């Protein structure tokens, strides 16, 4: 990038734009691509028509990110380039003071996990307003909606995010939802699985060949029973403060680590690692 006043102005905004795109997409590689695309669009723009460069760039990055999210959502399965962030796995023996410390250390990842469960419009409204203080009227213009509609989207997203903040009894209730889901998977109770899953649940599975994302309760429920049949032993764990489960094969080697996001009594997101190489590198408790 040549050193021109426009390039220097863009560079001064790069870190913030990258942060916006990363919160929107959850992928460092995708965020870099979005920021680069924003620069290309700026370089083709008559800058004399731009009154507020920071606002113009934020709008461009948000719109590109929204297009990426909508494209992902339109596909039932997608492969992601980024590897999921590291997991802190601890045995879950019920509510305990140290559990709050685990959660406090993983607020950033927990937020990213719950953001993945939001609809694209909800995610954009929440990220731009609550994390980057973009006014609702500007968010409405980006989405092609009214200011009030943008406020409603952000409010809906905020409720889902706040549901992860562990009010009194929330930990126990989320455990019960996860335990009911696992029991239904073992029984092959498809109707019960659908009851426990949010209709737009997102399952992210880290496999040896890449990260696969499956969208929708029907598809996730259909794959739950086969997964339950492949393990000999499992135990409740906390995965970055979220309720989860670790499963082992009969020979004692780890088969999977799962983390569940539970919102208003339903599972909205499941993150699973089944790649043996990654499981071997994790500091996992053994079967007991």
Image (spheres, grey):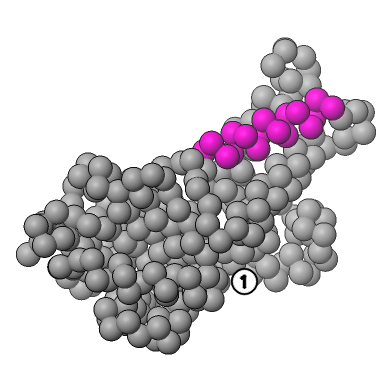
Q: Is residue 103 left or right of residue 195?
A: left
Residue 189 visible in the shown view? yes
- Span colored in magenta: 28-44
Label 1 neighbour load within 10 Å: few <14, some 14-19, many 20+: some
Magenta stretch encompasses residue 38: yes
Place residue 189 in its image quadrant. Answer: bottom left
**Which corner quadrant of the image does residue 266 belong to?**
bottom left
Q: How many marks?
A: 1
Foreground of the two, 208 or 57: 208
Residue position for label 1: 156
Query: Residue 146, how many percent across, how many down?
Result: 83, 66
Q: Nearer the viewer, residue 184 or 175?
A: 184
Residue 193 shown left or right of residue 241 in the figure: right
Vertical order, 74 against 279 (above or below): below
Q: Position of residue 59 (x, y in %)?
A: 76, 45
Q: Is residue 268 visible?
A: no
Secondary structure of the residue carrying tag 1 is helix
Rendering coords of residue 135 (x, y %): 75, 55
- Residue 177, compared with residue 282, is above or below; it is below
């Amino acid at each position: 990038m040549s050193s021109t006043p426009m390039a220097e102005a863009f560079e001064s905004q790069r870190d913030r734009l990258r942060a916006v795109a990363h919160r929107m997409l959850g992928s460092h590689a995708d965020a870099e691509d979005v920021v680069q695309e924003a620069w290309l669009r700026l370089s083709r723009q008559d800058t004399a028509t731009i009154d507020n460069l920071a606002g113009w760039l934020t709008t461009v990055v948000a719109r590109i990110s929204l297009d990426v999210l909508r494209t992902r959502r339109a596909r039932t399965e997608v492969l992601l380039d980024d590897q999921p962030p590291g997991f802190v796995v601890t045995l879950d023996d019920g509510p305990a003071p140290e559990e709050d410390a685990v959660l406090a250390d993983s607020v950033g990842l927990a937020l990213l996990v719950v953001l993945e469960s939001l609809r694209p419009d909800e995610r954009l409204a929440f990220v731009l307003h609550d994390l980057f203080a973009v006014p609702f009227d500007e968010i409405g213009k980006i989405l092609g909606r009214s200011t009030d509609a943008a406020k409603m989207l952000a409010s809906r997203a905020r409720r889902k995010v706040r549901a992860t903040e562990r009010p009194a009894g929330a930990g126990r209730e989320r455990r019960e939802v996860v335990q009911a889901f696992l029991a239904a998977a073992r029984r092959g109770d498809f109707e019960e699985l659908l009851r426990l899953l949010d209709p737009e649940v997102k399952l992210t599975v880290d496999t040896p060949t890449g990260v696969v994302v499956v969208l929708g309760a029907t598809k996730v429920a259909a794959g739950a029973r086969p997964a339950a049949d492949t393990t000999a032993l499992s135990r409740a764990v906390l995965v970055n403060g979220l309720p989860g489960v670790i499963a082992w094969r009969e020979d004692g080697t780890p088969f999977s680590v799962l983390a569940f996001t539970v919102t208003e009594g339903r599972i909205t997101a499941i993150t699973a690692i089944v790649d043996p190489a990654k499981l071997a590198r994790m500091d996992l408790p053994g079967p007991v």
